[in-house]
Image: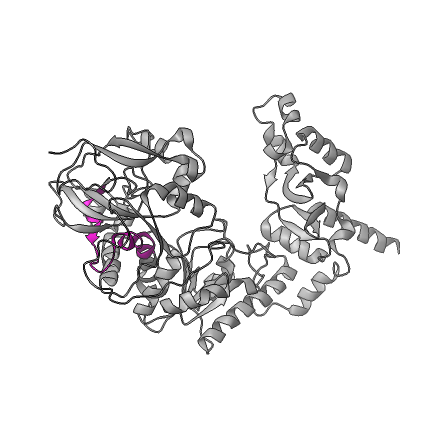
Amino acid sequence: MSKELYDIGEMPPLGVVPPKMHAWLIRAERFGEPKDAFKLEVVDTPEIGDYDVLVYVMAAGINYNNVWAGLGVPINVIAARNKAGEPEDFHIGGSDASGIVYKVGPKVTNVKVGDEVVVHCGTYDPECPSVQAGVDQMYSPTYRIWGYETNYGSFAQFTRVKGTQCVPKPKHLTWEGAAAYMLVGATAYRMLLGWNEHALRAGDVALIWGGAGGLGSMAIQIARAKGATPIAVVSGEDKFDYCMQLGAKGCINRNKFDHWGMLPHWKDTAGYNKWLKGVRAFGQEIWNVLGEKKQPRIVFEHPGETTIPSSLFVCDTGGMVVVCAGTTGYNATVDLRYLWMRQKRVQGSHFANDAQCYAFNQMVIDGLIDPCLSRGFTWNEIPHVHQLMYENKHPHGNMGVLVGAKEFGLGASASEPVPLPHPHLPETGAHDLPRTLPVSIPLDDVDSGAVAASAAANDDAVVRDIMVRDMSIVAPTDTVATAAHMMLSRNTTAVVVADQGNPVGIVSHTDVVLAGQGRPVETVRNLPVREVMTPNPYTIDAGVTLTDAVSVMTGKRIHHLVVTEGGKAIGIIATGDVMRRMVAEEARSAAE
């Protein structure tokens, strides 16, 4: 006889759907870090519609989207669904799953009760007019990412999905291995193979950013399987062996270079000169790996803001930079001269359509792709593993958690086609990128003599010569009134916030004005500085040349830098300080 609720790991009889289920829920009142946002609750098992399938979840995959869901940023997914008319005041996340079909809607034809499946995260209304007209489902206004933009994801005993989301589970994989690969793998597949004339071809060079991560590990294997030559960019040489075992021709340690960042204003010719030196060295490293002077036809991008200028520069004429994320920021800059004169393409890409998911899954079935499961976790560790991801302490590759499966290693009914070893990798630094001098790209005919001349005026000056010194520093606990009086008395537009000498923020005129929006003046005056400051300020050493300081400020589109010495804040420098020096130098020259 069917029970109302089954324990985790206690599988109901095939096709028997209990009215209640266990699930990890996020609610708006506890938005915050994953360790606090996820709570275990009992809820109603969801009903299904005509095109839906109810899957008993054996294992689930972990992705960053449900860190965002728990934080409530960049959107409140619960409020967004409520606004659209959905009644649930909770979110069940999880956008990767493996499991068994327990119930199907009357219009589902591709799966039946008892089928073992992997679930991909692309969901849409099959009756959408654009879909029925044959337009790519990804462009349908009904397209959503299951388990993030929809409710009832994989962190529950049962999940509701569309029949089109279900693909056959590879027989040689365990439940946790089968749950780990689809979101990142299908995303990588569309990026590399989904863009018509720029689809990856045998013999192409593909530059893969983040080769040791979930996306990168899939991209390397896809490129290798298609006869292309993947080169991995990683954050340290400890990841080289891992990427090479996956099929990379070679690896580049990005921390050997310091030219990363947004492009400055095009008038910053000194910055262009510095950029050109760094990015050409990066390009030379690609040639060193290949053993020939050949450019990547495809650059596989997701860091975004910090790396797009370099990716576009090294991409071959007529090639493509394809990007699916912005892990270092979204305000990427492009030198349009290279874009149009070299006829390169910058292409956005988001997950994959059904055909691409099915094609990628077939590569896994055929043993061409390893899921790169770095570690499995238990059902009770779901908040913990998201917390690891939030703190950037998660293992590399992909992760899976048990749901209905009682223990690790279950579910495989065939031998591994092509086993790939997964050496231990560090748990930190998966996506950190250097935040150093951002500069731009000149065309080859930029007159280097003119560049040098334009910088000469500041070559004899360093930051400490003109910075506003330590009286421009406040503590996080000081009041806004203290900071405001200091700015006025020092005739500066910002002050540094330092905690025991370590720079933690900047408070500017703008921050004070914004803090006053909608608040009484007295309240604003007494606010602690830490509540209104702009955190994580950009810093520069006191001994750096003024020319380089200007390049940093123009490149980052900021007006202030915290000046440090030995890692401790000693003052602040602004573009206005540079301008005052220029005016003073002009007046001195005129007097002479």
Nearest the viewer among 253 and 395 is 395
Q: How is the image coloured?
A: one colour
Q: Report x, y in % for residue 426.
A: 47, 57
Residue 320, above or below 399: below
Q: Is residue 285 left or right of residue 370?
A: right
Q: Quadrant of the C terminus?
A: bottom right
Q: Quadrant of the N terminus?
A: top left
Nearest the viewer among 142 and 146 is 146
Q: Report x, y in % for residue 65.
A: 38, 44
Q: Is residue 32 left or right of residue 5?
A: right
Q: Report x, y in % for residue 489.
A: 77, 34
Residue 245 occupies quadrant: bottom left
Viewer can see residue 532: no
Nearest the viewer among 39 and 348 is 39
The answer to whether residue 365 is magenta is no
At 51% from the left edge and 54% from the top edge, which residue is drawn? Answer: 432
Viewer can see residue 34: yes
What stretch of residues is rendered in magenta? 160-187
The answer to whether residue 170 is magenta is yes
At 69% from the left edge and 66% from the top edge, which residue is drawn? Answer: 452
Residue 148 occupies quadrant: top left
Going by the picture, which residue comes out furthest to the bottom? 291
Q: Report x, y in % for residue 533.
A: 61, 37
Q: How many numbered marks are there?
A: 0
